[in-house]
RNA sequence: GAGAGCGUAGCUCAGUAGGUUAGAGCGACAGUUUGUGGCACUGUAGGCCGUGGGUUCGAGACCCAUCGUUCUCCCCA
């Protein structure tokens, strides 16, 4: 047996980490609930064809596939070999793999909606907090197993949903104490830009290139556009588009000058204006270079970046007007957002944003100072537990020194000491381990004590 | 998929131009005569120096391979 290890990109979470993560989960969940979303859970694995082709070519490569069982069945050896030959040629075959781990929460949700649209009450608002898996190479802020917290509304074209999501982002990150920028854009404006610059089929080329603006700079973006087959006048328009800056109002005025004549762009700008004015959250920033990779988005798109820290996006989402049609259920529009818990955790850790209370585990330790003494302690402890006070008793009788040190290490704030004297007097010493203060309490006083 | 750095005690790392029995700090455990901890002091345990090969009289140090890990690009949460 070699040394035990973890699969690449996965992690164990110790008590401290779990508590901090739960703090994030609970905060986000409570916001979802307050906005009227219902929970949903789907399986860790999906049929491979549910996932394939939904995330683009890059995405397909990152899907974790699950090897079929029973490939060693002697009777099916030849079939297995033939199937494997296909795999070697880069094709998928059900003979080798027909299931895969969930890659995100949106597509499984779309699959769920497609399967249950007859029973659901629309608009259907669900939230989902579950892990997803990607066969990416791990690096800073990137894991192979990580949690997403998604909220989506399907069955509604109303822009009120976008407003709600902007507010959910703003509220959740305020509660977590994370200073963020909620970047928004509209795919409709990007589509209009593409139309202006060589046709709709150029949209992906253009968006992929301009998305990199803040990373590689305008010159490199122009180079990339040349490589992607755009001509000089087209690139000039894009350069003008990318030079848009100022506050949100100024940006809207500027973009109107470039794509304002286009009907689709007009719609996009109206939507952005509606969202900004209705939501009125100061964190919202228009970013016309925001594109987002997933090509199912059709309207407003969101991306959340943490300020004061170098980290990829910690949330993203947008409107997709036809997500379930790939599952043969057309005309169900939707819009949704996602929180990347693992990155939010990293950001909060780096900026030291976790409140101290998150870590309080055991509140009271009962010292073990003898058979009769510990029996009395035990009984009191059980009574405190029934009042939801988190207690434990030291596991064996030993000297004070050991018991104190144990309490220190576990950062337990209070110790209850019942020795022979207290036993005789039918009371207990309670000691605040931080301040060193201690006092004598009767049993009933102890049970009323506010920890 | 492409590239770079790093693998020495549980953790963070030293280890000098290859040269005796491999070091420190922190942590763990035990103790400094069991009714008051955090400090201090003393002691103990713990390493096929990631793995395999090569160069050499001699390798933790050099070379090759391999595995693991971290980071960058691509893409993303």
Image: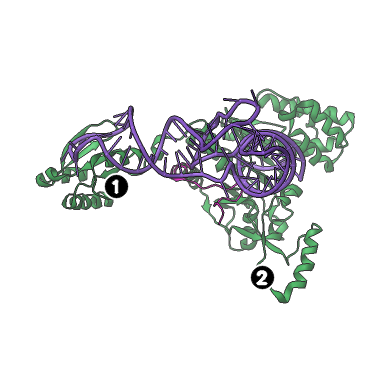
Q: Main secondary structure of the magenta part?
A: loop
Instruction: Tell me the tag on residue A184.
Output: none
Percent from the top left, x then y, of residue A74? Answer: 71, 75
Q: Is residue A451 visible?
A: no
A88 relative to A255, above or below: below
Please state if A117 lies on the left or on the right of A358 as rendered. Answer: right
The span picked out in magenta is: A1-20
Percent from the top left, x then y, of residue A154? Answer: 62, 52
Residue with the mark numbered 2 = A70
Camera-side residue of A446 and A331: A446
Please state if A100 lies on the left or on the right of A445 as rendered. Answer: right
Q: In the rendering, what colour is chain B?
A: purple
A391 relative to A233, above or below: below
Q: Where the C terminus of chain A falls, by quadrant?
A: top left
Instruction: Tell me the tag on residue A391.
Output: 1
Is residue A104 magenta-colored? no
Camera-side residue of A351 and A107: A351
The subunit letter for the residue under badge 1 reads A
Q: Which chain is green?
A: A
A171 relative to A120, above or below: above
Nearer-N-terminus badge (2/1)? 2
Percent from the top left, x then y, of residue A356? Answer: 40, 35
Write the residue at 67% across / 65% down: A68
Percent from the top left, x then y, of residue A250? Answer: 69, 24
Task: Report helix, strand or loop for mark 1.
Answer: strand
A362 relative to A227, above or below: below
Is residue A19 magenta-colored? yes
Quarter-wise, where is residue A273 in the image? top right
CA separation, marks 2 and 1? 50 Å
């Amino acid at each position: 047996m070699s040394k035990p290890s973890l699969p690449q990109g996965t992690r164990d979470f110790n008590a401290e980490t779990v508590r901090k993560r739960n703090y994030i989960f609970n905060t986000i969940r409570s916001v979802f609930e307050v906005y009227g979303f219902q929970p949903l859970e789907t399986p860790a694995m999906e049929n491979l064809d549910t996932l394939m082709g939904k995330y683009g070519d890059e995405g397909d490569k990152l899907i974790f596939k699950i090897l079929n069982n029973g490939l060693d069945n002697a009777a099916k050896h030849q079939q297995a070999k033939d199937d494997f030959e296909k795999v070697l040629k880069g094709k998928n075959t059900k003979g080798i793999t027909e299931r895969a781990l969930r890659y995100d929460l949106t597509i499984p949700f779309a699959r769920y909606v497609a399967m249950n649209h007859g029973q659901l009450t629309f608009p259907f608002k669900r939230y989902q907090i579950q892990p997803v898996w990607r066969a990416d190479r791990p690096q800073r802020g990137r894991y192979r197993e990580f949690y997403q917290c998604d909220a989506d509304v399907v069955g509604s074209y109303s822009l009120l949903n976008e407003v709600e999501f902007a507010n959910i982002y703003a509220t959740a990150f305020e509660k977590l104490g994370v200073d963020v920028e909620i970047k928004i854009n509209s795919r409709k404006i990007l589509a209009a830009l593409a139309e202006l610059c060589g046709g709709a089929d150029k949209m992906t080329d253009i968006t992929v290139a301009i998305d990199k603006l803040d990373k590689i700079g305008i010159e490199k973006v122009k180079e990339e556009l040349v490589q992607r087959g755009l001509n000089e006048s087209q690139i000039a328009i894009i350069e003008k588009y990318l030079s848009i800056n100022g506050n949100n109002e100024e940006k809207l005025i500027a973009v109107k000058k470039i794509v304002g004549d286009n009907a689709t762009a007009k719609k996009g700008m109206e939507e952005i204006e509606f969202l900004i004015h209705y939501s009125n959250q100061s964190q919202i920033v228009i970013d016309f270079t925001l594109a987002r990779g997933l090509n199912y988005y059709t309207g407003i798109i969101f991306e959340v970046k943490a300020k004061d820290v170098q980290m990829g996006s910690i949330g993203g989402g947008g409107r997709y007007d036809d997500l379930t049609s790939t599952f043969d259920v057309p005309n169900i529009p939707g819009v949704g957002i996602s929180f990347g818990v693992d990155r939010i955790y990293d950001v909060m850790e780096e900026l030291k944003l976790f409140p101290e209370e998150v870590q309080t585990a055991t509140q009271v330790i009962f010292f073990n100072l003898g058979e009769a003494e510990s029996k009395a302690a035990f009984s009191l402890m059980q009574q405190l537990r029934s009042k939801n006070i988190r207690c434990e008793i030291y596991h064996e009788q030993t000297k004070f020194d050991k018991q104190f040190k144990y309490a220190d290490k576990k950062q337990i704030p209070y110790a209850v000491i019942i020795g022979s004297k207290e036993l005789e007097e039918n009371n207990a010493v309670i000691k605040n381990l931080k301040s060193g203060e201690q006092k004598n309490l009767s049993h009933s006083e102890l049970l009323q004590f506010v920890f």
